[in-house]
Image (tube, grey):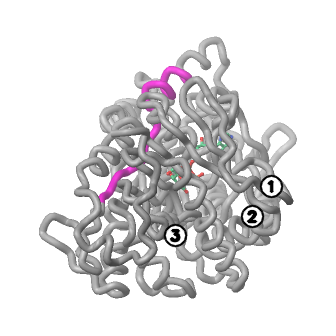
Amino acid sequence: MGRLVIVSNRAPSIDGTGDSGGLVVALKDALAKDGGLWIGGAPEQTDTPASSLVFHHRPDFDIGLFELEPQLYRDYYFGYSNSLLWPALHGRVDLIEVQPRYAAAYSEVSRRLARMISDTVRSDDVIWVHDYQLIPLAHELRVLGCRNRIGFFLHIPVPGLETFKAIPEWRDLAAWLAEYDLIGVQTQRDLAHLINIFRHTLRGELRSNGNMGINGREVVLGCFPISINVEGFRRLAEEGSIGTPPPPLPRLIGVDRLDYSKGLPQRLAGYETFLSQYARFRSKVSLLQIAPPTRDDVEAYRDIREELELRAGHINGLYGTVDWTPVQYIHRALPRDELAVLFRLSRVGLVTPLFDGMNLVAKEYVAAQDETDPGVLILSQFAGAAEEMPQALIVNPHDPQDMAEAIKTALEMPRAERIARHEALYDYLANHDVEYWSSSFLKRLLAVETIDLHWTSRYSAYQPGVKAS
Ligand code: ADQ
């Protein structure tokens, strides 16, 4: 195999600092191990973007940045990706914004990026594309004659067919996906939806090996639940907490990007129900919600911030006293080591999204616990992580009563039960960490038979000129 070439909307930082956020944290270990190239969007847009990738060398791997004009970036990223695909794939078709220029920008970015990549990629490189912002990329690369193995991993959920069809370009999206050699999704739920989408849009046929026959070729499908560096996060929490005093009251903690898919108003509704029904806990617990802003340029994100602040203020006004603030709300990102300690020193982890591809916070919370006196994870049935973490208290985030009961159960859970649940969760995670995730995906991608016999005839623009190493 040549290099591993990762392609994502966002590149890691050039100097290696500030690599936070699900995708960067998850992948940098895999690349550092094998060496390779990470191609991603430049942090700033420019009116005169370079027509080729701008390279930087990090000790662990190389970075190739692609630059875009501000308007194109807005329409592709805030527009198509985050005002249409993100809400639609999270089942929020009520929030989608359809604009022809968004769709044009979305395809244009993959088209341009494909040109830049085909100038750089060597014939034995393996390309791994990430997430919903770049779905057309394999198609555009194939048009340019790229015959490399190309895998795709979708970090967010695949919705049911009817929801998927709310996206005007749903047929194109399905066809673009079918150009990858391997498509990885987070959960069995997503896999079932994807198979159904291929069946109905492209007359895909499920083969006995689990692959899909589509348009005369076989697309490999797989479920690869993403994870974290479990041992590393455990150590961060353990070492950081030495000498840190425990909080004055048993603490419930929520850590989420401020996004409507994370179910933050519903979480507060559950907490409010808990305080209203179990008065004996008033002044005896506190909820710390950390929710940094994201995608503030999209209206739905400003709305969710307002709603959250209103609800937190409402609970504090209703139940707070001079000595006790029921909800503490921090609207900014914190360093990972601080988060790890906060998780460890919290009795309950609240991870209650309405729909989530996986949710790494659930795994971080478990990894951070003191195994001799662990806290309890309350986890939404709609987080991808729920498929792997049945020993958490699984809740329906739409039901405040269910959440209130789970909070009470968690706070009252005997130590022996907490230890037993934590041990089962931790053991599973230790065997299924982020390295397991990336190596299983890559192993499967490398096992894919390369370009099938039908390939050349399907692409009239085929040029055998992709650079050899
Ligand atoms: P996200 O939607 O970003 O990721 P998640 O999986 O929870 O969601 O990852 C968030 C990451 O950001 C975690 O590592 C968390 O610790 C960190 N983070 C959150 N709030 C923070 C704060 N205030 N300060 C510092 N760090 C903070 C998408 C999908 C998920 C999927 C991931 C990975 O939506 O479903 O799990 O990709 O595939």
**Point 34% across, 50% down: residue:** 388
Q: Does the CB distance between marks 3 and 1 fall below 8 Å?
A: no
Q: Earlier in the sequence, mark 1 or mark 2?
A: 1
Asked if residue 303 can be seen in this view, the reply is no
Q: Position of residue 30 (x, y in %)?
A: 44, 35
Give the numbered dot on residue 73.
2
Residue range of the region highlighted in magenta in the rendering: 222-237
Q: Along the line of sight, which residue is nearer the eye, 378 or 39?
A: 39
The residue wearing badge 1 is 45
Residue drawn at (15%, 64%), measured in percent from left and top?
Answer: 209
In this rendering, the count of numbered labels is 3
Mark 1 Cα-neighbour bin, 10 Å: few <14, some 14–19, many ≥20: some
Ligand 1 is within 8 Å of the C-beta of the residue at disc 3: no
**Is residue 229 on the magenta stretch?**
yes
Q: Give the residue drawn at x 58%, y 23%.
A: 59
Q: Residues within 10 Å of mark 3 (few under 14, many from 20)?
A: many
